[in-house]
Amino acid sequence: MTTLRRMLREDRTFAAFGMRLEVDEPGRAVLSMVVRDDMTNGFAITHGGIVFALADTAFAVACNEDERVTVAAGADITFLRSTRAGDTLRATAVRRIRTGRTGLYDVTVTDAGGEVVAEFRGRSLATDRVVGAATSA
């Protein structure tokens, strides 16, 4: 089991959605989550915002590779298949390139059977802030 780093221990969405950290390596992260009834839309399928939140959280873990606070500069998602309450989703984030203060990361979200649910591409920006240092909003 991977030790939960500070950024996730303090992430309320991570906790509220019941996400689990499976892999935490520089430039790579895997998170999973079981879809609950309250995560579905009016068509009884997983709300796209929930899928995006899981992918975005995996992206955040993967791109925060050092002491600099790194944030999203932008992201896009393509939904490829629907899921329902009770399904387990897994988001695998991988660094494609990181140069200077910017990075590009791809996240694949799959269901328990390994079928691709969504593809997410995130663009990161490393700030001048340091993880753990006192910061203001």
Image (cartoon, rainbow, N blue to C red):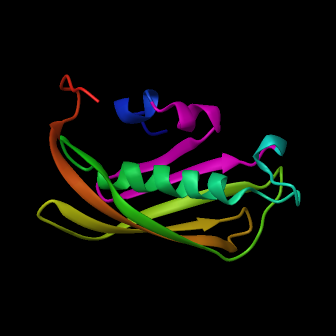
Q: Is residue 97 left or right of residue 10?
A: left
Kindly identify the residue that appears in the image at 71 percent across and 64 percent down: 111
Q: Is residue 64 above or below residue 106?
A: above
Q: Is residue 100 above or below residue 50?
A: below
| Depth check, front residue: 137 or 30 | 137
* Location of residue 123 in the rendering, given as x and y in whole percent from the top left corner: 33, 65
Q: Residue furthest top?
A: 134
Q: Is residue 63 left or right of residue 93?
A: left
Kindly identify the residue that appears in the image at 64 percent across and 37 percent down: 18
* Location of residue 24 in the rendering, given as x and y in whole percent from the top left corner: 39, 48
* Location of residue 49 in the rendering, given as x and y in whole percent from the top left corner: 63, 55
Kindly identify the residue that appears in the image at 80 percent across and 41 percent down: 38
Kindly identify the residue that appears in the image at 55 percent across and 36 percent down: 13
Q: Which residues are magenta?
A: 11-36
Q: Is residue 30 above or below residue 13?
A: below
The quadrant of the image that shows the C terminus is top left
Q: Count numbered badges in the picture.
A: 0
Q: Is residue 36 above or below residue 106?
A: above
Q: Residue furthest front?
A: 137
| Depth check, front residue: 46 or 137 | 137
* Location of residue 28 in the rendering, given as x and y in whole percent from the top left corner: 37, 59
**Any magenta on residue 35?**
yes
**Any magenta on residue 42?**
no
